[in-house]
Amino acid sequence: MDAFKTFTGIVAPLDRSNVDTDAIIPKQFLKSIKRTGFGPNLFDEWRYLDRGEPGMDCSDRPLNTDFVLNDARYQGAQVLLARDNFGCGSSREHAPWALEDYGFRVIIAPSFADIFFNNCFKNGLLPIVLSNEIMDNLFQQATGEQALELAIDLETQTIGLPNGESIGFEVGEFRKHCLLNGLDDIGLTLQHVDAIKSYEAARQQSAPWLFTQ
Amino acid sequence: MKTLYDKLWEAHVVRTEADGTSLLYIDRHLVHEVTSPQAFEGLRLAGRKPWRTGANLATHDHNVPTQDREKGITDPVARLQVETLDKNCQEFGITEFEMDDIRQGIVHVVSPEEGATLPGMTLVCGDSHTATHGALGALAFGIGTSEVEHVLATQCLIQKKSKSMLINVEGKLGQGVDAKDLVLAIIGEIGTAGGTGYAIEFAGEAIRNLSVEGRMTVCNMTIEAGARVGLVAVDDTTIEYVKGRPYAPEGEIWGRAVDAWQDLHSDEGAYFDQVITIDATQIQPQMTWGTSPEMVVPVTGTVPDPAQESDPVKADGMRRALEYMGLEAGTPCSEIRPDVVFIGSCTNSRIEDLRDAAAVAKGRKVADSIKQALVVPGSGLVKKQAEEEGLDKIFIEAGFEWRDPGCSMCLAMNADRLESGERCASTSNRNFEGRQGTGGRTHLVGPAMAAAAAVTGHFVDVRSL
C-alpha cells in the first residue's frame, strides 16, 4: 500500500444517503480475480445508460449525463462527498478498489457503514466523518459553478478550504499511522508471532474442540 | 457482570494496543470464490502460507448455476473464479465442498449444518452476512478481502471493540408471523444505520422461542441494520442443534464444551450502551416497498408518502425509491403484483423456511401472472432433506422450479436474475437498486409470504389464506 500524502483535489458531490456497495460496484464485476481495473465500472448503473458487463470497453458506452461523475466540473475528482451510511451492504472490498482505481483518495460523509469504513484503510483510501451541518456547507460550495478544491492533510487532520478556513477531523491513531506510512497490516501482525502461538497453545488446552480439524 | 459480546471478545484477545486496537484470534474462517482469489494471490506473492489450514472451510456459492449442473459453468468469467478457488484450496490444503459434493451450498447454511460453527467461536468470512452464525453464540462478522488474507496468514485480525446494543423482543410472535417479519420490523424501527458501530444481542421471549434456523434469519440481517455482529445467547436449543453434527466435538470433549458453553450469555445486570425493547405481539407480516431494508411496512398497510416525512434528505430518498420501484404513495400493499418469486438465500433457504413456504404452496398453483417462481435450497443437504419430506413435489406441483443450492437470485451473479423493471417477492436480504439484476425491483418478505404472493399473484397477508 502506498503512503498517504497531503494533496489538494477536486470534490465530487454525490448527494445521496445509503449509497450501498452494490451501487458502488455492481455484482457482475465481482467475478474478476484481480484487485485492479474496477475504476471504469465505479457506480456503473448510475454512470452509464446501458447495462455494463465485464470486459466491455467503457469509453464507447452511453453516459448518463445527469450523474455527478459525468459532469465536466468534477473530472479528475479525488474527493467524494456523500450523505449518511455510505458503503452499506456487502463486504466486497471491490468497492474501495473501484473508488481508488477511479482516482478517489478521500470520501467525506456524515457516517459510513462499518465494514466499508474498515476496508478503506486497507487500500490507502481515507474516509472522513463530518457533521451534517458541515456537510451541508460543503455540498453547497461543491455545487457552485466552479468545482470546489480541498486540501487534505492527514498528518494535521485538517481539511483546507479555498478561503483559508480549515476543518478538523478525527481518525484512529493506529489507522493514521498505517496510512501515513503505507504499512502492511499482515507484516505488523507477524511481529507478534510469539504472542499468537502462546495464545493458541493455551487455547488448545482450555478449548480443544476448537482445534479438532 | 459482562455481556455475551464482552465474554466472546475477551476470550479471543491475543494482545491490545494503547489505543484499544486488539489482535483477535479467529477460530473459523469460511471461504467462497468471490472475495478470496485476491487474498490467496497476496499470500502467494508474499511467500506466505495459511497459519492453520484446518481452521478454514471453503465452498462455492455466489457464482454457481442452480440448474443443468452437468453442463458445468457456462459463463467463462464465473468458471475461472470457481476454478481459482478449487486450485487455491488444493494448493494450500484447505477443505472445500465443490459443486458435485452434497455438502456444497451457501457458506452461511453449510457451516452451521456441518457443526463447523460452534458456540463461543470467533468466525469470519469475506461476506457481510457472516453475522448469521451469531445465532449459535459465536462472535461472527463479515470482512473484506485484505482481512481474508490477514486471517489466512496470521489466524488473527486487527479489530476495535464495538459498542453493545441489546434488542429485547418481549412477548410472543403471533400465528403466521416469522423470524423474517421480526427482523424486518426491527430494521424498520432502528433504521438501516441504527446498529452501525454496535454488536447487537437479540434476547427476550420471542427470540428464545425461535429455532436456531429462525435465530439465524434474525442474526443474518443484523448487517441490514448496520451492525456487523448479531448474537443470541446459548441455550438448550443451541446445544441440541449442534449435537451430533459432523464437525461437532464428541465424547468427553463434547461434555467439556457443553460445560463451557453454559456461560455464553450476558450476565444479569450487564451494561449495554443501548437497549431497545420491541413488543413481539404487535408485529405483523412485513414487506419492503423501497430500495433500503428500512423501507418496510406491514403487508396490511400502504406504500408511505414522502410528503409526510419531515427530514428532507430522507424524503428525497423515499421519492427516489418510489420512482425506481415504479410505485405510487398510498398504494395498498395487496395491490402490488410481483412478476417473479424467489425463495432462497442465506436468510431463508433452510429446511424450516422451505417447510413454511411449502405449507402455503400445498394444493395451490402459482398464479398465471407470475413469470417465474424459484425455490433454491441453501445446501445440498437441505435439498436432500426437503426431498425426503416430499417438499420438492409440493413445489413442483404448484408450479415452482426446484433448483440446486447457491446464492442464486439474491445477488444475481449467476444466470438467475431479474430483467429491468421486473418486480420480485424475494426471501433474500437486500432490496438495493439493481441487486437482483439491473433495473430489478425487490420486495423482501418471509418464505410463507413469498409463497402466498406466488399463489395469489399479489402481496397478501399469509394469515388470510
Image (tube, rainbow, N blue to C red):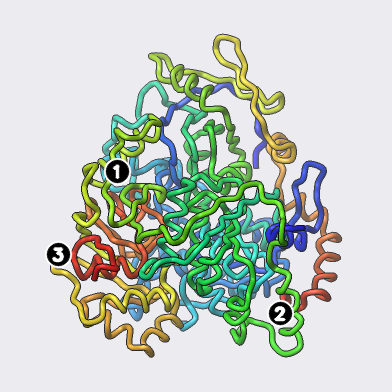
Residue B258 is labelled as 2
Tell me if residue B161 comes above or below residue A157 in the rendering: below
Which chain is disc 2 placed on? Answer: B
- Residue B130, by quadrant, is bottom right
Tell me the quarter of the picture where residue B228 sits: bottom right
Q: Earlier in the sequence, mark 1 or mark 2?
A: 2
Task: Bin the neighbour count of mark 1 within 10 Å (Cα to Cα): few under 14, some 14-19, many 20 and up.
Answer: many
Q: Which mark is residue A158?
A: none
Residue A208: where, in percent of width, then height?
77, 78
Give me the residue at 20% from left, 61% from top: B458
Percent x, y of residue A176? 70, 36
| Nearest-to-viewer mark from 1 and 3 | 1
**Mark 1, residue position:** B304
Between residue B423 and residue A145, name the one nearer to us: B423
Quadrant occupied by the N terminus of chain B: bottom right
Q: Which residue is mark 3?
A: B369
Determine the chain carrying the residue at label 1. Answer: B
Asked whether the viewer can see residue B53, the reply is yes
Whether residue B40 is visible here, answered yes or no, is: no
What type is the residue that disc 2 sits on?
Val
